Image (cartoon, rainbow, N blue to C red):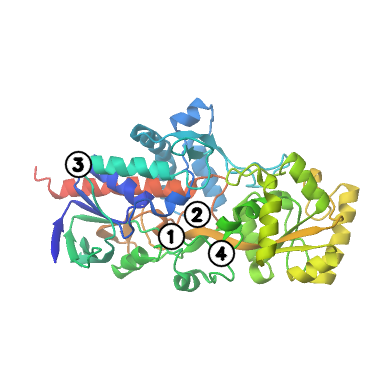
Amino acid sequence: MKQLNADVIVVAAGLSGLAASIAAAENGASVITFEKGNTTGGAANMGMGPLGVGSRIQREHMIALTPGEAYRKHMYYTHYRVDARMVRDYYFKSGDTIDWLCDMGVEFCGVQRAFGAPENTRAYSDGEFTWHVVQPEGGGRPGPRSATAMIKKMTERAMDLGVEILLETPVTKVIMEDGAAVGVLAKDKDGEEIEARANAVIIATGGFGDNPQMIKEQTGYEFGKTIFNFAVPGMKGNGIKMAWECGAGKVQPTMELMYQLPDNMNHFILDGAFRQPCLWVNKLGQRFMPEDQIANTTFTGNAITAQPGCVAYSIFDSKLLKKYKKKGPDIVSHVHPHDLYEHFDEQWNRDVADGYEPVTQADTLEELAEKAGIDVDGFMEQIEEYNSMCEAGFDEVFEKDRSYMQPIEKGPFYCCRQNVGAYGSLGGVKINHKTETMTQDDKVIPGLYCVGTDACNIFGDSYPFILSGNTMGFCLNSGRIAGENAAASTADEFDFD
């Protein structure tokens, strides 16, 4: 068995693990980082950028949101059912962390919000300008995977600081002695076992989005049936389980809800094209929310979860499709291409020909409902009510913005089933504001830290989409906090003055 030693061991080299590794090394600690994949970054390679409040980029754009304001908005949103000190420390560090990344050479396109609500906004409906979207390597329009450029710079910074990153070397166990974490057991790609000793271990394995059994056990959702979350390979929940085995307390995990199509990345045009304030109904044919609010994907994911079968249906007619093709979407996404409808027919015809099950086209509304699996009588009653309100110019049920009250009446008709989606899992391991793991009765486990989505328990029951970039922001800042604290504890361990 190979023997290794370091001041700090980091378990996984995703976004939070890289942040922890860099922060610990910057503060004088020797660091070994184990990663079971063949590259760094993990799920963050799918992302676009982190939250930051108070960064120099925001100041340059004259965005006046302060860390205190963001902190209060977050706490009001969660009704103070989360760790206020952790939330406070996160937001007050987040702007400096963006500057920290800039100093590494990370370039940002600017700062934006994930969505804009209509003028007659409702509670929590509008977004703040907190999302620092990474400039893709080589330039071009930002989109999914933009953050890979940030991961590359962070990996280079870690290596420049002397962090030893061991790829394809999963950790299998945290070594505990006298109630403290003192190292890990791992196995490299050749099968050789490794025992690595350290004064601090930081778990950063990214949750369990790729573990259907754990999703069902911990959240009640069934992968591929009631939820279609991103399943980034390797996100099996191993770090969470290791922490629990070490005596860490459990905080109820959740899924970071949104909505999406099954296998959405291969149907990305339609995934975006139907995210519009047209007519949305459930299996009973009934509307269930004001469609002008569907841009808040967290709220929409929550709403779909509450519907029969955990599904909804987005519907427009040929007249509305013609309008979208001519004038563009009513709701513009920063994630999907802006020229969606230029490619709509190609994607639609291909998916219909291939029998892609979520999409339906019909010449009559009755046929559309029957083919899509919507109750026909309920749907036709809803169509009559909805079209009548469109003609009157006012939504008497949900007060949807009148500019979006456009009737569904001219065939052919287009329907796309919307499913509950998720970016991954959130939380599970109990930590304090220093990111130290704690037992169920709130005692610190010496030497053991947990960060990122393994320990992201600050969102309550719903991701705060109003403060966009929050998950990547928490990963970065919790990792940085853990690295700094782990390095400080290691220094204290050897301070004999």
Q: What separation in Å lies between label 4 and label 1 (alpha carbons)?
A: 19 Å
Residue 427's label in the rendered image is 1
Residue 130 visible in rendering: yes
Q: Secondary structure at mark 3?
A: loop
Q: Earlier in the sequence, mark 3 or mark 4?
A: 3
Q: Secondary structure at mark 1?
A: loop
Q: Which mark is nearer the camera, 4 or 2?
A: 4
Instruction: Assess disc 1: are there few (<14), some (14-19) or many (≥20) residues with their C-alpha within 10 Å of its C-alpha.
Output: many
Which residue is identified by label 2?
A: 459
Q: Which mark is nearer the camera, 2 or 3?
A: 3
Position of 224 relative to 453 (above/below): below
Question: Where residue 74 appears, x then y in whole percent?
Answer: 52, 47
**Label 1 sits on what residue type?**
Gly
Residue 28's label in the rendered image is 3
Q: What separation in Å lies between label 2 and label 1 (alpha carbons)?
A: 9 Å
State which quarter of the image contains the N terminus.
bottom left
Position of 60 relative to 468 (above/below): above
Q: Residue at 58% of width from left, 71% of height from top?
A: 225
Task: Describe residue 113's horizontal placement relative to residue 195 as left or right.
Answer: right
**Label 2 sits on what residue type?**
Phe
Instruction: Assess disc 2: are there few (<14), some (14-19) or many (≥20) residues with their C-alpha within 10 Å of its C-alpha.
Output: many
Q: What separation in Å lies between label 3 and label 4 (alpha carbons)?
A: 43 Å
Which residue is identified by label 4?
A: 228
Res 203 quadrant in image? bottom left
Residue 248 visible in rendering: no
Q: Secondary structure at mark 2?
A: loop
Q: What separation in Å lies between label 1 and label 3 (alpha carbons)?
A: 29 Å
Task: Describe residue 347's horizontal placement relative to residue 240 as left or right.
Answer: right
| Residue furthest out toward the left | 496
Q: Earlier in the sequence, mark 4 or mark 1?
A: 4
The front one of 257 and 80 is: 257
Instruction: Assess disc 3: are there few (<14), some (14-19) or many (≥20) residues with their C-alpha within 10 Å of its C-alpha.
Output: some
